[in-house]
Image: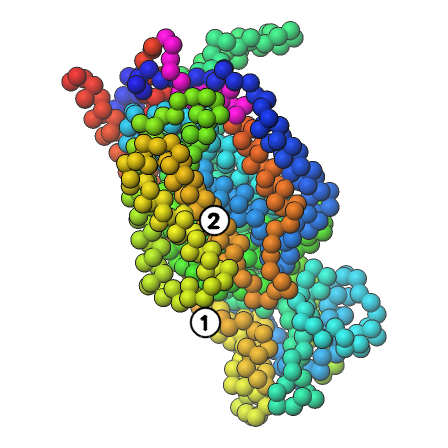
């Protein structure tokens, strides 16, 4: 037998184990932090106020340098006939749903990134290119992104869009909560452009208080449900509506944060690298025993 | 018998055959569509969209590819860690398959991501909570380990036989010395890499299952379960030997060799209990979460789920238990191929069929371009395997010198 003896086996194994455990503390905590500030911002969307003018769509495109026809063309209600989703050319869209109580007053719903408090995309992103900011925004970093589209698989609201027709530097496109505009002291473009104040911008806690107040004051106008208050652990954008949110095609989601199960499995397997290192040691022991048993048999024969 | 078998290059066959020409054409076709992806973007050749971000390039090239390369770590565990000498004849072919398989997985990932030139980002940009990050890092390290494990095969072939022509003649001596150094070093340290390979495989085979957990309600309840990582690991372990059996029988046939039935039959016997454990967890999950209600209707998901279990697990499990099957090459091949197909189908189900986005404008079916690229990759894989066994000592052949077992087999 031309292999290492028992001592060198043990020596090398010890070195490797020590090296692996030495790495533990830094690696186990790698990953984006999620600090939820009590002052984090949000937007309250009151779909009972929205008139479906789609000015927000135009303002959003203009603010983000996306090509758009002039604002006048948005007066044409034809696009509302079909359900649309945000994509790489429109970070927000407005959809229309029939109102069973009053056919003349359909409900219109603006859709964009919800800016979750515990975002699945942030947890999923392989390189940590998506981060939850203290002000509530969920932002994407073009310098890190590799374009794997795992955020799109993970998002419970199916929001991130990908530039499928770009061969070089395709981007993940989604609402960025107008971070650049807000840095200049301006409102998010959609909020500013809304002619009927269907969108209210402010600290999330205050918005929820306003929302509860509105529901309490006009119980006939609203269903008693603030969508986004608790869904997937809470979202920065919250919605009020006159009918059940399932009829407005909002996904029915639980109150647990979307990345919860996945993260607990992940952290369980890698609890300070104990399971992999133990497995390594166990296999080493099995290998050593098996070989020595085989060796003994050869000696005897 | 095994003592007179020794891995050596297959010299009795030529590389080019009619089958090889077909594979070359399929490979060229795949590469042509791939060129389209690099020139015009992913959207130009695939049916992927914002509702269906992952298709068969992830479901087959990556997920099924990783699962079917499991023969590498299962035979390493059996042959080297449990030290069962009699299985050493299948260790090298399995190692070669794993090495080529993982290379295809890496290439498959690179072409599917939008910014392939940033494939190295996960090495320095870490996100510990991401299952994909863990899979990516483990696959990168494991691929390196597989290449290291293959080095002894290269040194065995070329030590003392390096003979470079013309201008490069001066390099002959240094290269030979390098090969000898690598051989000596690895002789003493190979066990470290072998154990690392098994640990890394256990980790990423299971984490591949964690990948879809975060999709939550977007994945059909028949497949969406918190024990997905366990199911992925168990199915990877049970598909390892069937994959080795399939390859070995195909190679024997292609190279006109006598199939190693005494080894393959025994490998087959071990598959039944492994499949049994997998089946138990799969059925347990079905009843604990009461998802069997979805099987009452006949539709795509129920048909896929049932065929995955019936043809991929139950029937081959029964077959592997029968001594007649263990002795007959065609029956053994059928049973093994069913498991391979079943696990491949399971990965496609998990990543493609089960994925139902909350909003969609029609369902996903792979485009001609996607299928061409996948078929092209598989063809290239087979061609590389054929080339490798003609060049390197991988397949065990009866040794004319009647020497002892291969030097490599006592290593580790």
Stretch of the chain drawn in magenta: B386-401
Q: Is residue A33 magenta?
A: no
Chain ID, mark 2: B
Helix, strand or loop at label 2? It is helix
Instruction: State the residue at coordinates (61%, 37%).
Output: B376
> In the image, are marks 2 and 1 on the same chain?
no
Relative height, residue A219 to residue B231 (above, below): below
Q: How dense is the environment of label 2, judged by Cα within 10 Å: few (below 14), some, or many (20 and up)?
A: many
Q: How are the residues colored?
A: rainbow
Q: Quadrant of the N terminus of chain B?
A: top left
Circle 2/circle 1 CB separation < 8 Å: no
Q: Quadrant of the C terminus of chain B?
A: top left
> Where is residue B172, by image quadrant?
top right
Q: Position of residue A171 (x, y in %)?
A: 67, 53
> Where is residue B306, by image quadrant?
bottom left
Instruction: State the residue at coordinates (46%, 58%).
Output: B303
Residue at mark 1: A255
The label on residue B304 is none
Q: Is residue B101 left or right of residue A5?
A: right
Task: Name the one closer to the observer, A163 or B178.
Answer: A163
Q: Position of residue B170 (x, y in %)?
A: 59, 7
Instruction: State the residue at coordinates (63%, 34%).
Output: B27
The label on residue B345 is 2
Instruction: State the residue at coordinates (55%, 8%).
Output: B163
Q: Is residue A99 visible?
A: yes
Task: Name the one closer to the observer, B100 or A196.
Answer: B100
Q: Is residue A135 visible?
A: no
Q: Is residue B395 magenta?
A: yes
Q: Position of residue B73 (x, y in %)?
A: 39, 35
Chain ID, mark 1: A
Q: How dense is the environment of label 1, judged by Cα within 10 Å: few (below 14), some, or many (20 and up)?
A: few
């Amino acid at each position: 037998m031309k292999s290492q003896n028992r001592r060198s086996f043990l020596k090398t194994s010890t070195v490797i184990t020590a090296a692996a455990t030495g790495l533990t503390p830094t690696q186990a905590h790698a990953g984006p932090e999620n600090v939820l500030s009590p002052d984090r911002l949000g937007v309250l969307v009151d779909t009972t106020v929205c008139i479906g003018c789609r000015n927000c769509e135009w303002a959003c495109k203009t603010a983000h340098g996306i090509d758009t026809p002039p604002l006048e063309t948005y007066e044409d209600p034809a696009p509302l006939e079909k359900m649309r989703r945000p994509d790489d050319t429109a970070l927000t869209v407005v959809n229309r749903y029939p109102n069973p109580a009053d056919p003349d007053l359909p409900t219109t719903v603006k859709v964009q990134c919800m800016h979750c408090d515990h975002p699945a995309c942030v947890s999923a992103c392989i390189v940590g290119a998506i981060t939850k900011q203290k002000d509530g925004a969920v932002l994407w970093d073009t310098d890190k992104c590799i374009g794997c589209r795992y955020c799109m698989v993970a998002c419970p609201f199916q929001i991130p869009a990908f530039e499928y027709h770009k061969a070089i530097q395709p981007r993940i496109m989604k609402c960025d909560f107008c971070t650049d505009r807000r840095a200049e002291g301006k409102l998010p473009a959609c909020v500013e452009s809304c002619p009927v104040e269907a969108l209210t911008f402010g600290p999330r806690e205050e918005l929820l208080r306003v929302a509860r107040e509105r529901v309490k004051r006009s119980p006939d106008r609203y269903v008693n449900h603030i969508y986004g208050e608790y869904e997937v652990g809470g979202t920065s954008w919250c919605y009020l509506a006159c009918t059940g949110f399932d009829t407005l095609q909002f996904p029915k989601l639980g109150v647990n944060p979307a990345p919860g199960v996945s993260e607990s499995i992940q952290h369980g397997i890698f609890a300070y690298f104990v399971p992999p290192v133990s497995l390594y040691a166990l296999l080493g022991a099995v290998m050593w025993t098996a070989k020595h048993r085989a060796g003994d048999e050869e000696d005897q024969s | 018998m095994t003592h007179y078998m020794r891995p050596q290059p297959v010299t009795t066959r030529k590389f080019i055959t009619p089958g090889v020409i077909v594979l070359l054409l399929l490979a060229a076709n795949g590469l042509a569509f791939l060129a389209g992806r690099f020139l015009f973007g992913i959207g130009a050749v695939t049916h992927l969209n914002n509702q269906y971000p992952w298709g068969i390039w992830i479901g087959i090239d990556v997920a099924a590819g990783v699962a079917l390369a499991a023969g590498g770590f299962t035979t390493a565990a059996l042959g080297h860690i449990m030290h069962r000498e009699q299985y050493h004849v299948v260790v090298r072919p399995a190692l070669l398959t794993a090495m080529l398989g993982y290379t295809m997985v890496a290439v498959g990932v690179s072409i599917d991501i939008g910014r392939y030139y940033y494939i190295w980002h996960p090495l320095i940009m870490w996100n510990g909570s991401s299952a994909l990050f863990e899979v990516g890092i483990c696959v990168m390290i494991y691929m390196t380990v597989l290449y290291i494990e293959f080095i002894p095969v290269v040194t065995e072939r070329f030590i003392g036989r390096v003979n470079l022509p013309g201008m490069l003649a001066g390099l002959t001596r240094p290269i030979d010395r390098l090969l000898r150094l690598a051989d000596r070093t690895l002789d003493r340290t190979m066990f470290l890499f072998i154990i690392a390979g098994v640990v890394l495989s256990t980790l990423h085979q299971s984490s591949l299952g964690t990948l879809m957990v975060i999709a939550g309600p977007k994945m059909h309840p028949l497949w969406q379960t918190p024990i997905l990582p366990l199911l992925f690991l168990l199915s990877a372990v049970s598909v390892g030997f069937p994959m080795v059996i399939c390859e070995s029988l195909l190679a024997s046939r292609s190279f006109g060799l006598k199939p190693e039935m005494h080894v393959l039959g025994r490998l087959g016997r071990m598959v039944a209990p492994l499949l049994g454990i997998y089946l138990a967890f799969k059925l347990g999950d079905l009843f604990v979460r009461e998802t069997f209600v979805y099987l009452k209707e006949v539709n795509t998901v129920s048909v896929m789920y049932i065929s995955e279990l019936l043809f991929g697990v139950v029937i081959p499990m029964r077959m592997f238990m029968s001594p007649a099957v263990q002795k007959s090459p065609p029956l053994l091949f059928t049973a093994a191929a069913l498991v391979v197909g079943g696990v491949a189908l399971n990965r496609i189900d998990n990543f493609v069929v089960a994925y139902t986005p909350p909003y969609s404008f029609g369902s996903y079916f792979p485009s001609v371009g996607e299928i061409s690229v996948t078929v092209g990759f598989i063809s290239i894989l087979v061609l590389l395997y054929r080339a490798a066994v003609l060049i390197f000592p991988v397949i065990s052949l009866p040794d004319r010198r009647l020497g002892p077992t291969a030097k490599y087999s006592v290593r580790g």
